[in-house]
Image (tube, rainbow, N blue to C red):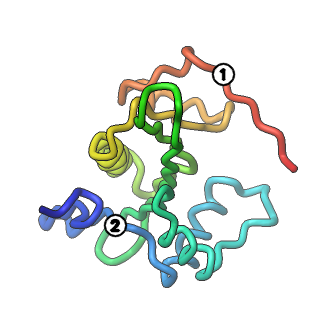
């Protein structure tokens, strides 16, 4: 039996699909990252790096395709954990739906897809990161059931 990850989600009426990113998608993913982080001048997505992600059993870079154009992406990392037996937890980063396609349910579909994969992998929970100034995104995540007040994230660039 195929998993959600293997078959993707297809909605023929809108010609959409959620699938694993492929090296050929690098340029379109890079454009989405630049839309998310317009002041970051170091954004570069390489075909080789996407291949590395594909070969990592605990890392999943997804794209949301609409009529053969990538309009969204999200990156899921499965983290092994010793706290609760063999149950991992998920970390979701860089969830992006292009501005022109926001408000059409694509982000919700992408997140439900990720949640389905996390359930298949028996994850205990999902952590999600979002820029502190992205208040519209925070409302979106709240609607999906994510609690932005239960934890506080810190990061340090190296």
Q: Please state if 145 lies on the left or on the right of 61 as rendered.
A: left
Q: Is residue 104 visible?
A: no
Quadrant for residue 116, please give it.
Answer: top left
Q: Can residue 39 be seen in this view?
A: yes
Q: Nearer the viewer, residue 100 or 139?
A: 139
Residue at horizontal 17 percent and vertical 62 percent from the top: 11
Above/below status of 9 relative to 22: above
Q: Earlier in the sequence, mark 2 or mark 1?
A: 2
Quadrant for residue 15, please give it.
Answer: bottom left
Do tag 2 and tag 1 residues touch (Cβ < 8 Å)? no
Q: Where is residue 85 drawn, in percent x and y? A: 42, 30
Residue at horizontal 81 percent and vertical 64 percent from the top: 41
Q: Please state if 61 lies on the left or on the right of 18 as rendered.
A: right
Q: Where is residue 75 drawn, in percent x and y? A: 51, 54
SS of the residue at dot 1? loop
Above/below status of 122 relative to 110: above
Residue at horizontal 54 percent and vertical 21 percent from the top: 148
What residue is disc 1 on? 152
Residue furthest to the right:
158
What residue is disc 2 on? 19
Q: Which of 105 and 19 is in front in this view?
A: 19
The quarter of the image holding the N terminus is: bottom left
Q: Nearer the viewer, residue 103 or 75?
A: 75
Q: Please state if 112 lies on the left or on the right of 44 as rendered.
A: left
Residue 100: which numbered mark, if any? none
């Amino acid at each position: 039996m195929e998993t959600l990850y293997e078959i993707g989600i297809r909605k023929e009426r809108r010609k959409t699909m959620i699938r694993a990113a492929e090296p050929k998608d690098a340029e379109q993913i890079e454009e989405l990252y630049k839309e998310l982080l317009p002041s970051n001048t170091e954004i570069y997505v390489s075909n080789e790096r996407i291949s590395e992600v594909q070969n990592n059993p605990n890392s999943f870079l997804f794209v949301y395709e609409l009529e053969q154009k990538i309009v969204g992406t999200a990156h899921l990392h499965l983290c092994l954990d010793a706290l609760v037996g063999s149950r991992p937890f998920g970390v979701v980063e860089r969830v992006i739906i292009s501005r022109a396609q926001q408000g059409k349910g694509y982000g919700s579909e992408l997140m439900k897809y990720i949640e389905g994969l996390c359930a298949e992998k028996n994850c205990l929970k999902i952590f999600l990161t979002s820029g502190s100034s992205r208040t519209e995104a925070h409302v979106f995540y709240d609607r999906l059931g994510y609690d932005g007040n239960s934890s506080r994230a810190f990061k340090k660039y190296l």
